[in-house]
Amino acid sequence: MRRSYFRAPLLPYLLVAPQLVFTLVFFYWPAVQGVYQSLLLQDPFGLRTSFAGLANFAAVLGDSHYLNAVRVTAVFSVAVVAGAMLLGLVLAAAAAQPLRGVAVYRTLLVWPYAVAPAVAAALWLFLAHPSVGIVGRALVRWGTGWDYTLHGGHALVLVVVASVWSRVAYNFVFFLAGLQSIPGSLLEAAQVDGATWFQTFRRVVLPLLAPTTFFLLVVNALYSLFDTFAVVHALTKGGPGKATETLIYKVYVDGVVNLNLGSSSAQSVLLLMVAVVLTTLQFRFLERRVHYG
Amino acid sequence: MRSSRNPSHTGGTLVAPAAWAGVRWPHLRRRVRFLPAHLALLAGVMLFAFPVYVAFVASTAELPEVTSGTLRLVPGVHGAENYWKAFVLGTGERIRGTPMARAMLNSLGVALGVALGKIVLSVLSAYGIVFFDFRWRAPAFWLIFLTLMLPVEVRIIPTYKVASDLHLVDTYAGLILPLTVSATGTLLFRQFFLTVPDELVDAAKMDGAGPLRFLWSVLLPVSRTTVAALFVVLFIYGWNQYLWPLLVTTSADKEVVVVAITKMIGTGEALVDWPVIMASALLALLPPTLVIVTLQRWFVRGLTETEK
């Protein structure tokens, strides 16, 4: 903590005020509205509202479409988190070696972070299109019957591939930073002891990477819960049927398209609870890391 | 790292490193040893580049080549007209969108507005919280800190309601202001400010510098790399926003690039003007990619520090 402060009666309040005003107007006020809305029941014409208690939540949790969205989100999240982390780790492990041209490799592996998920979706849509896409046509030629506009499974694969593609760079950056912070003397010691490359990786590198791995696990989970709206919206609009309707996409469809505010708000509040749990986990871990560090 | 992986080490083989010392082909051993790493990296580079390369080929092709599925993986000669249509006209066969020139300008405005707005708000609030001892300091910090828990997507509909009450729908202010709220910047600057030694504050006081003078002439200059790193990350964040712009803009002349492109694609019919769409997509990803590639060092720093 600091010993030396400036003294001024009004100035600190003026300094903090802009951020606080924005936070209250665009953050806490909508959040309160959302929670309030989730407790109200509206007739289909939006003319009358009545207090409904937890009826919206009960309706949401009993709705088979919602449970479908939970299932889709689970499959999607596990696939995206695992895919992006594994690829990111492998690439980072390779890029941490003293290779010739390693700086060029790093640049060529970092840039996809700049591509908006929706633009990545557009690129993959064009590749995977069953009648104009290069990959899509090849898949059709090989007799797979590929058509992501007809088959739910195909659509889910496409959404996962586009998301992983746009997410690997992020994991690469963090794994590489984690690998570079491992002291070289530890790796040398392992080699002097006669450990093979794999043994060193398994017994020395991975345990030391555990904080980075855990951090990425949480952040990727948050990402696959919230930030994938763009990929789904740009690629499949949740279809075919409801095969790629994730939880966040359903919040949007029910609130903006179907104008069912009560249900949409209840879904938001449920998602919010998951976000709070995940973020708390992240901070608990950060505290621990500080103690260790 | 670099020095630790001395290529003359032989790992787990039974031959002692010394036995290799006189051998004349260490280069070969080195190459073989790092071959898997090179292969993995090349595969990754190609995986990332492939969709963009195909998009580039399509953006230089003629529409019938694409719709008939006879597109070759070699660039064509129709690039000029496709990029003209995408950038200036915003129209093509069966598509009618916002010209990329307009949409890119909008995205640039949003990216700069979000980045600068967040930096100004968070520098001021972090300065107040770290360098002043005032009564509502802890509550103010916690109010800001807790916003980390709520991604914009979760409260999107009530936020839209607020924006509409404030007559911000379909305005640039409505596009930018709600996206400037977040705790990450404040936390990053707070962390950095806490490392600024007390002696600097005492010296400023002794020289008779007031708090604002200290902020401007001492603190901001020593924070400039942190500002630069955060700017790069926030610029990308602002440029790539999707859900909020999709909701809050209704007129085509305020559309940002990312939204403009998915609107052109629509339901993804086979016969839309893919060359023009792919030209637009490449134009959309070019500015943020250039920012990352040229400012890579700051970008990596900004990313790893804001998130941790």
Image: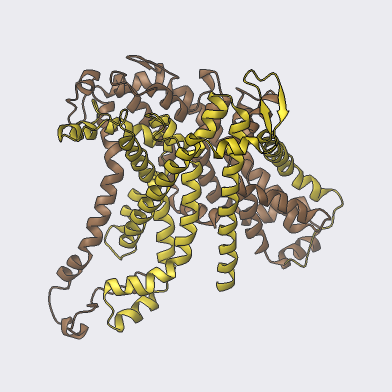
Figure check: B201 above or below A222 = below
Give chain B's shade.
brown
Asked whether, in this view, residue A95 is left or right of residue B132, the answer is left
Measuring from the top left, give residue A138's x and y in whole percent. 18, 34
Measuring from the top left, give residue A164's x and y in whole percent. 37, 46
Asked whether, in this view, residue A41 is left or right of residue A282, the answer is right
Residue found at x 85% / y 48%? A10
Total numbered circles: 0
Colouring convention used in this rendered image of the protein: by chain
Residue B1 lies in quadrant: bottom left
Give chain A's shade.
yellow
Residue found at x 37% / y 48%? A79
In front of the other: B222 or A80: A80
Q: Quadrant of the C terminus of chain A?
A: bottom right
In front of the other: A72 or A176: A72
Measuring from the top left, give residue A174's x and y in whole percent. 44, 57
In front of the other: B176 or B200: B176
Q: Quadrant of the N terminus of chain A?
A: bottom right
Q: Residue furthest left?
A: B24
Figure check: A24 above or below B14 = above
Residue found at x 71% / y 48%? B124
Residue found at x 26% / y 34%? B54
Figure check: B54 above or below A191 = above
**Is residue B125 among what the camera can see?**
yes
In front of the other: A246 or B193: A246
Measuring from the top left, give residue B39's x and y in whole percent. 22, 56
**Is residue A168 among what the camera can see?**
no
